[in-house]
């Protein structure tokens, strides 16, 4: 007779169906841990200084994975804007996407990239990463006052906002010509938005976050004045099919939206 031990379930990933953001923040600690910022800073400094190739979520990689749909959308916008590319990267960390794509943007394109982030990230970005092209701002309004942007980039950020639908209505009023949504979490089927607890594997960093999975149809209702020019899967392995409570219920996806 043989005995089989049940397979141990992965303790990391997305869990629960919570109703109250505040209670979940108290449970998880939120996104503002200084250790996460410091790890991201050290990783991106190595990329900036040519000591590493690519950083994602504070982790260094020896080979760069390019987000080709994002790059193609940025190049489309640059051509349409007369070889100018003015981007607001909301929730863009310390410039992760900028360092990922900048070597694919031709020198003929006049590039301006503004990261809008939490206060501690902006102060760190200004101290260690800001230059003629890459800037850091506290709000979208502050960034737009400094340099009007044509492209709003939302990469793996909307699902981490307390009131994401209020935010989407706010940016719609900003009247961006292009909105580029990337690595955004959705729930399969015609289910309502679901608020989960994300537990990050310790090899990335020790953290727990509140994280939304959106109803895709409801999410897109915010962009009734935009044409969906392109929709695409996440470029990150594993994000095309995501588990909630160990069930395949979610997926990351992106959209390139053009104002009509």
Image (cartoon, rainbow, N blue to C red):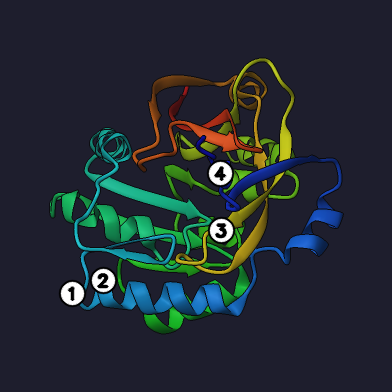
Q: Position of residue 93 (x, y in %)?
A: 48, 63
Q: Which residue is mark 3?
A: 200
Reading the chain from its start, which is encountered first: label 2 or label 3? 2
**Residue 175 visible here:** no
In the image, residue 256 sits, relative to residue 97, either above or below, namely above
Look at discs 4 and 3 and give the one toward the viewer: 4
Other-residue count near label 2 (Cα within 10 Å), few / some / many at <14 / 14–19 / ≥20 = some
Pointer 2 with pointer 3, Cβ within 8 A: no
What separation in Å lies between label 4 and label 2 (alpha carbons)?
A: 43 Å
Label 1 element class: loop
Mark seen at residue 127: none
What separation in Å lies between label 2 and label 3 (alpha carbons)?
A: 23 Å
Image check: 213 left or right of 156?
right
Q: Which residue is mark 1?
A: 50
**Residue 228 visible here:** yes
Pointer 4 with pointer 2, Cβ within 8 A: no
**Which quarter of the figure has residue 79?**
top left
Look at discs 2 and 3 and give the one toward the viewer: 3
What separation in Å lies between label 4 and label 1 (alpha carbons)?
A: 47 Å
Q: Which residue is mark 4?
A: 5
Q: Which residue is mark 2?
A: 47
Pointer 1 with pointer 2, Cβ within 8 A: yes
Other-residue count near label 4 (Cα within 10 Å), few / some / many at <14 / 14–19 / ≥20 = few
In the image, residue 148 sits, relative to residue 123, either above or below, namely above
Reading the chain from its start, which is encountered first: label 4 or label 1? 4
Reading the chain from its start, which is encountered first: label 4 or label 3? 4
What separation in Å lies between label 3 and label 1 (alpha carbons)?
A: 27 Å
Reading the chain from its start, which is encountered first: label 4 or label 2? 4
30 or 120, nearer to the observer = 30
């Amino acid at each position: 007779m043989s005995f089989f031990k049940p397979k141990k379930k992965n303790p990391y990933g997305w869990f629960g169906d919570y109703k109250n953001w505040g209670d979940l923040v108290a449970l998880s600690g939120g996104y503002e841990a200084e250790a996460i910022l410091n790890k991201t800073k050290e990783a991106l400094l190595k990329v900036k200084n040519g000591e590493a190739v690519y950083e994602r979520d504070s982790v260094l990689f020896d080979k760069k994975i390019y987000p080709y749909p994002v790059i193609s959308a940025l190049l489309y916008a640059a051509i349409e804007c007369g070889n100018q590319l003015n981007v607001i990267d909301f929730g863009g960390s310390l410039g992760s996407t900028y360092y990922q794509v900048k070597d694919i943007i031709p020198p003929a394109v006049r590039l301006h990239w503004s990261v809008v982030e939490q206060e501690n990230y902006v102060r760190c970005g200004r101290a260690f990463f800001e230059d003629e092209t890459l800037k850091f701002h506290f709000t979208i309004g502050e960034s737009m006052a400094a340099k009007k942007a044509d492209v709003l980039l939302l990469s793996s950020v909307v699902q981490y906002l307390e009131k994401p639908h209020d935010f989407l209505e706010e940016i719609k009023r900003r009247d961006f010509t292009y909105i580029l949504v990337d690595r955004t979490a959705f729930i399969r089927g015609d289910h309502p938005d679901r608020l989960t607890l994300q537990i990050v594997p310790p090899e990335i960093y020790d953290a727990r976050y509140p994280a939304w999975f959106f109803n895709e149809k409801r999410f897109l209702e915010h962009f009734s004045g935009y044409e969906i020019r392109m929709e695409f899967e996440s470029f990150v392995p594993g994000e095309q099919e995501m588990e909630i409570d160990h069930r395949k219920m979610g997926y990351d996806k992106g959209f390139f939206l053009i104002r009509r």
